[in-house]
Amino acid sequence: MGVRERNESAWLLPNDGTRTNHRLRRDMRQFADSDEIDLVIVGCGAGGSVMLQRLARAGWRVAALDAGPFWDPDTDWVSDEAGSHHLYWTDPRVIAGSDPVPMGSNNSGRGVGGSMVHYAGYTPRFHPSDFATHTLDGVGADWPVSYPELRPYYEQIEQELPVAGERWPWGDPHGYPYRPHPVGGNGEIFLRGADKLGIMAKVGPVAIANGRFGNRPHCIYRGFCLQGCKVNAKASPLITHVPDALAHGAEVRPDAMVTQIAVDKLTGRALGVHYVTGGRERFQRARMVAVAGYSIETPRLLLNSASSRFPEGLCNDFDQVGRYLMVQGAPQTAGRFDAEVRMYKAPPPEVSTEAFYETDPAKDYKRGFSIQTVSPLPITWAEHVAAQGHWGPALREYMSDYVHWSCLGGLCEFLPRPENRVTLAGEKDSYGLPVARFSYSQCDNDRALARAAQSVMEGILHAAGADEVITIQRYAHLVGGARMAEDEQHGVVDRYGRSFAVPNLYITDGSVLPTQGSANPALTIMAVAARTAHHLAAGIS
Amino acid sequence: MSGGGRGWDGRFPGFDVLDQVRHWDQVTADVVLARTCSPASVKFFTESEESCGRALLNLLTGQDGKAVPVLEMVDSRLAAGETDGWRYSDMPEDGQAWRDTLSHLDADAYQRGGTPFADAAQADQLKLIQAVQDLESADWHGLPAAHVWSLWTRYACTAFYAHPFAWAEIGFPGPAYPRGYKNTGVGKLEPFEVGDAHPSEDPVREDV
């Protein structure tokens, strides 16, 4: 079946230079709170939107509630860094541990489309080894799902986004539906340095069609991928899955903050969700609930849904909720060239290498890292420069050199650890709910990986001709926090995302991932959700 | 402007980001141009916090606040509660953290020279700021100095490098929708970009 027959989203968008199909939204089906719909989804990002689209197509009566707005790229988004602050989840959160992880703009989205509205656009697959790191390397965890079980869903989603890139030689080798994009200055530097060192690097994989796709126009290489794509060229669920879902009778209810999942005391089944919209508390009944609030808000919602049956939090009888939360170590190394690189021209995601992804028996650490172009805009670049200790005139002088710098980012597979977790803090948010406290600490293997990635990036930049290199230690992405496992002693959900504790409660976002590999997680989150949706749709028919 | 450095003026002769406003989409233009209007009056900071904060933020960004009103930009963020969405567990929330740390900075200035921070000689102000940075993760008035430094520089840089004045200084053309870029690649310029007049004056290399 062609992609348009499965998912017509790109053809449901306007082709007149505007970006939103307002009629589709105006005519959207609207369920009453009192309707017992088939499925209510909490969160309309990578996982939630795929569930919504798949199950609407299967004829389910389904609604997705999102705490944030139903974005219109024309009027809500700007081609500007500071002006994009509203794309991030900026409700209060507390960060702790020996290596606390900043949230907000780095990893947390808000509104329909979720974090994929502001992700860079890289969409690599996980490697087959990621699903069995415990067996293969004695670290991390084995998934209750294998790579071959996920492969068909990877292929589907790659066509639906769609993904552009060179034929991919790493992991399970595969091709992409669209040819690679031409590279800008930063990609050119990476390819040049890698070639000198004999390191294989490839263009892609990015969820930006190289060409038109349906009514979505070609990328204009303006470099603001992380500020929301005003062009509709970079994929996010707002344009890749939500339009088709609406056309098949789904409802998206924006500005609706879910505060609690209700569970029947007698039957132990979920009844629906309490939510707040327009300052009013409401309750949506549903036959089934899917939580897709991502790795901080999903555990927080479960913990905030404590009841007499679940005094420590919903699905938390075995103290698994919020644990094994992962972030990738993301050291960012920049190199200075006399030539002008002007890395802000072209999408930040251009070129990657996964040559260091797998465990190398010759090294004293397990697992590995990938390296990708990242092309920070001025505010983010200032953070990189200020991290070197510069301020005042020295900061200004360094910053004036912006056009000469090329910047690479590592993604290191930091290991899942039970003590890296979300709990509830003492303070409350504007809804009166306890906010999330995220504690994070690295282990020795993590630190060794970050050092190794930095060293490779320095090597590539020097080989390309850089005279100086500077590095900032960062994190990227979030997964885990409600992981899938073989049993309820080791995780929160089973291999299909169904919670062990509540038979009609599913989790369908990045929090179910037991390991993270060295891959950007968006594609895998969507593929896992598509698999769960397929399972549910098949079960009902 | 405070001294130090070789200067960064004139690297991109004649380059003015605002020359291209007619090519920006209206929504973006409205957001960016608002930053170039006279700054809103101070709402969040008290009078003494304002003086102290203005001196601190101007020194952190190496300017006198006339080109880029960093104090007002930070103030309006705090007044609107526009935080980054997280705080360290050993720091108060951002608004309170700003109030507390400005008051600590004043206390340090009193101890050193008997005046509030804003009235101290610039050499003393620079030393007081440098002392906080030099503490790294050690304690400063009951707070980890590194987290204080992170708060200050994060807000300062986010404000300063949001301004077209700062973009022109670093050769960055700012908004790029709906036009985009056609000449990407090392050494390639758009017709409206201006090349660096001193491409081999690498501040890093000169410091070595």
Image (tube, coloured by chain):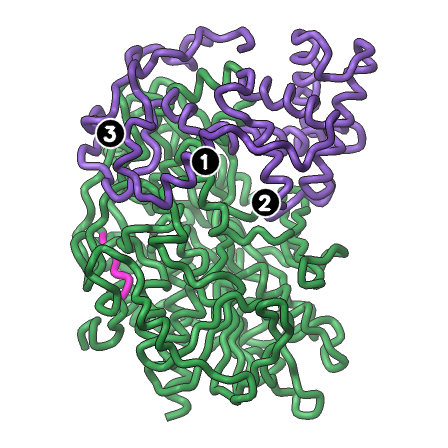
The reply to whether the magenta stretch includes residue B180 is: no
Is residue A240 in sight in this rendering?
Answer: yes
Q: Callout 2: helix, strand or loop?
A: loop
- Left/right of residue A441 with respect to residue A3 in the rendered view: right
Residue nearest the viewer, comparing B51 with A196: B51
Where A108 sits versus B201, above or below? below
- Pair 1/2: label in front: 1
Q: Chain of mark 3?
A: A
Q: Name which residue lies at 61% across and 76% down.
A: A488
Three-letter amino acid code at the position of disc 1: Ala
Residue hosting label 2: B82
Same subunit, labels 3 and 2: the answer reads no
Q: Colour of chain A?
A: green
Which residue is disc 1 drawn over? Answer: B34
* Image coordinates for residue A75, horizontal then vertical, percent: 37, 53
Q: Is residue A184 above or below residue A305?
A: above
Residues rendered magenta in the picture: A159-164
Residue contact between numbered discs 3 and 2, judged by CB atoms under 8 Å: no
Q: Cα distance, mark 1 to mark 2? A: 17 Å
Near mark 1 (Cα within 10 A), the count class, few <14, some 14-19 or many ≥20, is few
Q: Residues within 10 Å of mark 2 (few under 14, many from 20)?
A: some
